[in-house]
């Protein structure tokens, strides 16, 4: 119950600046993306890290050895339908695109699982879509929540409607299986490609890294 409250409060908490604190998780619909764009559909999961101080930050991970979010408000999870982002960014001026883009910056906490096991499959998406998604996410944060600050978006993995992605998906499921073994936590089968990591991040105690 506490986890649900902490997630949903992001949609109603308003800062003195007039900004609304964005939710921890903001996922486009994978089903809708595939329905709208058929075989061309590309769907990416990204970490969004902002520079602004986290008003809900809890005790830091001193050793930096675990992915410990503790409901950080400067670390968000987004799932992006790339084709929708392409349409949104195309409507922006070149000046706005440059303004919304945020360069990668040093982060003092562990914020993403290692992508080394699927980096070969991930790299083409990073090269092609990193800037697009970065601009798209910041545009959404600014437009929906009136945020005066921007974040850097790091692609975690992507899915598309092509058979060659099956190996990629199997690799990801293997990683989830290893996490489950170490954490004594079982992800629901239906959530493996969408909400599993989010489920982990909603747990009060994280001892799996």
Image: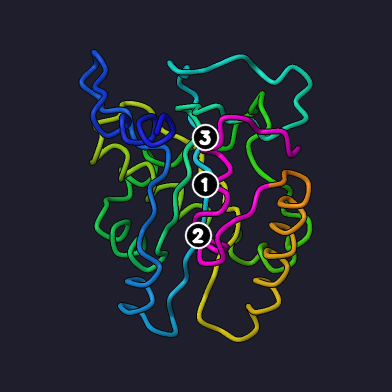
Name the residue located 68 percent from the left edge and 65 percent from the top edge.
173
Q: Is residue 10 positioned above or below 160 on the image? A: above
Q: Which residue is identified by label 2?
A: 194
Whichever of labels 3 and 2 marks the residue nearer the N terminus, that label is: 3
Give the Cα distance between marks 1 and 2. 8 Å
**Nearest the camera: 97 or 203?**
203
Query: Measured from the top left, where is residue 206 in percent x and y?
Result: 66, 33
Name the residue located 23 percent from the left edge and 29 percent from the top edge.
12
Relative to 207, 111 lies left or right: left
Discs 3, 2 touching: Cβ within 8 Å: no
Q: Is residue 169 positioned above or below 28 on the image? A: below
Q: Magenta-highlighted stretch: main secondary structure?
A: loop
Q: Secondary structure at mark 1?
A: helix
Whether residue 201 appears in magenta in the rendering, the answer is yes
Give the Cα distance between marks 3 and 1. 16 Å
Discs 1, 2 touching: Cβ within 8 Å: yes
Name the residue located 27 percent from the left edge and 34 percent from the top edge.
11
Mark 3 Cα within 10 Å, few/some/many (few <14, many 20+)? many
Mark 2 Cα within 10 Å, few/some/many (few <14, many 20+)? some
Q: Which residues are magenta?
A: 185-209
> Which mark is drawn over residue 198?
1
> Which mark is drawn over residue 49?
3
């Amino acid at each position: 119950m506490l986890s649900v409250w902490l997630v949903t409060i992001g949609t109603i908490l308003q800062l003195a600046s007039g900004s609304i604190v964005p939710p921890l998780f903001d996922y486009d619909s994978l089903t809708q993306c595939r329905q709208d764009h058929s075989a061309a559909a590309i769907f990416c999961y990204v970490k969004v890290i902002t520079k602004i101080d986290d008003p809900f930050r809890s005790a830091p991970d001193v050793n930096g050895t675990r992915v410990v979010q503790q409901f950080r408000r400067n670390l968000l999870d987004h799932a992006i339908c790339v084709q929708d982002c392409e349409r949104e960014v195309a409507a922006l001026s070149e000046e706005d695109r440059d303004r919304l883009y945020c360069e990668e910056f040093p982060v003092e906490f562990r914020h993403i699982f290692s992508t080394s096991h699927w980096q070969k499959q991930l790299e083409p998406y990073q090269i092609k879509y990193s800037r697009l998604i970065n601009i798209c996410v910041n545009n959404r944060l600014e437009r929906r929540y009136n945020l005066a600050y921007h974040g850097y978006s790091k692609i975690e993995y992507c899915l598309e409607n092509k058979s060659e992605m099956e190996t990629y998906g199997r690799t990801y499921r293997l990683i989830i299986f290893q996490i489950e073994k170490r954490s004594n936590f079982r992800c629901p089968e239906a959530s493996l490609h969408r909400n599993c990591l989010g489920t982990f991040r909603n747990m009060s105690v994280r001892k799996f890294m």
